[in-house]
Image (cartoon, rainbow, N blue to C red):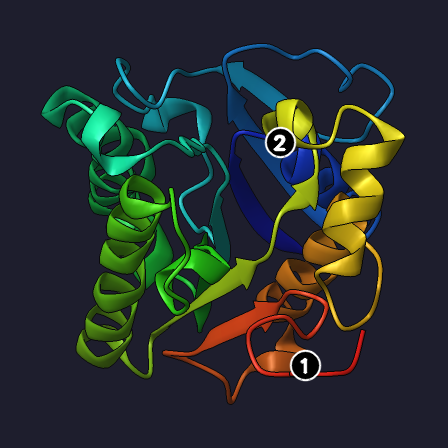
């Protein structure tokens, strides 16, 4: 069985991924709370990606997969965003990723071939109004992941999942009514909003041996929004 470490895993995509992985892997979840995890097969320990140092004594010597789930969504006009907002978003979306990966790099290197899965956004590849902070931080993730994948191939694979707006607690204020959900669904060629399971299934695939010839890729799981133009 593989040893998989999730940073964040008690809500949204992380929780869906724990449910996906729990029966065929040893799952370790480092998150601020263990809410929703009580009935799931995983090992939890408290961890705040913004303030804490990862306690490696709670982890196995070999880590076969790492997924970083925390993130932020600030959709506002650029003129109303303070530089501190960009700094805060960069911290949770990117700097904390760097710190986590560096801390467990020996564990990842001890695996025959380990897999890192990170999350970006459709906004990193499409110019979308009110998305300057999201696009900046997620663009950093995408460039970082490609360089890291090149540096550590073939020992460590690194891939990025780039969703469109997904129905999770993080996006609740944008999808908290049927009207908002329907408007968002109609903007996508596949005419529905993405779910946490949609994204978790892709992450699970990237952690598995079925994807062992895939690295340095940005995989768009976005209902076709980033590449398809269809009649409404």
Residues at marks 2 and 1 touching, judged by CB atoms closer than 8 Å? no
Q: Position of residue 204 (x, y in %)?
A: 68, 60
In this figure, which residue is indicated by the disc labeled 2?
Answer: 171
First of labels 2, 1 by sequence position: 2
Residue 69 placement, left or right of 47? right
129 in relation to 152, above or below: above
Look at the numbered disc 2 and give the secondary structure of its residue: helix
Q: Position of residue 15 (x, y in %)?
A: 71, 33
The residue under the point 53% across, 73% down is: 219
Q: Nearer the viewer, residue 171 or 69?
A: 171
52 in relation to 181, above or below: above
Q: Quadrant of residue 177?
A: top right
Residue that sits furthest to the left in the current view: 83
In this figure, which residue is indicated by the disc labeled 1?
Answer: 210
Q: Quadrant of residue 100?
A: top left
Q: Nearer the viewer, residue 43 or 132?
A: 132
The residue under the point 77% across, 47% down is: 183
Spatial CA distance of label 2 from label 1 is 30 Å
Quadrant containing the C terminus in the rendered view: bottom right
Residue 105 placement, left or right of 223? left
């Amino acid at each position: 069985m593989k040893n998989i470490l999730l940073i964040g895993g008690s809500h949204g995509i992380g929780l869906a991924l724990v449910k996906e992985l729990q029966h065929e892997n040893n799952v370790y979840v480092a998150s601020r709370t263990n809410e929703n995890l009580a009935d799931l097969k995983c090992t939890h320990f408290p961890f705040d990606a913004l303030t804490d140092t990862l306690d490696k004594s709670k982890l196995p010597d070999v880590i076969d997969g790492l997924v970083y789930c925390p993130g932020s969504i600030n959709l506002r006009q650029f003129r109303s965003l303070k530089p501190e907002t960009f700094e805060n978003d960069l911290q949770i979306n990117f700097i904390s990723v760097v710190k986590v990966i560096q801390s467990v790099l020996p564990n990842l290197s001890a695996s025959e071939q380990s897999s890192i899965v990170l999350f970006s956004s459709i906004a990193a590849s499409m110019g979308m109004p009110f998305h300057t902070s999201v696009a900046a931080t997620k663009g950093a993730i995408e460039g970082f992941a490609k360089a890291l994948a090149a540096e550590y191939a073939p020992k460590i694979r690194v891939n990025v999942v780039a969703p469109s707006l997904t129905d999770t607690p993080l996006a609740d204020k944008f999808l908290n009514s049927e009207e908002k959900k329907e408007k968002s669904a109609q903007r996508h060629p596949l005419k529905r909003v993405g779910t946490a399971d949609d994204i978790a299934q892709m992450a699970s695939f990237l952690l598995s041996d079925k994807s062992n010839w895939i690295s340095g890729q940005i995989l768009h799981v976005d209902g076709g929004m980033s590449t398809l133009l269809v009649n409404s």
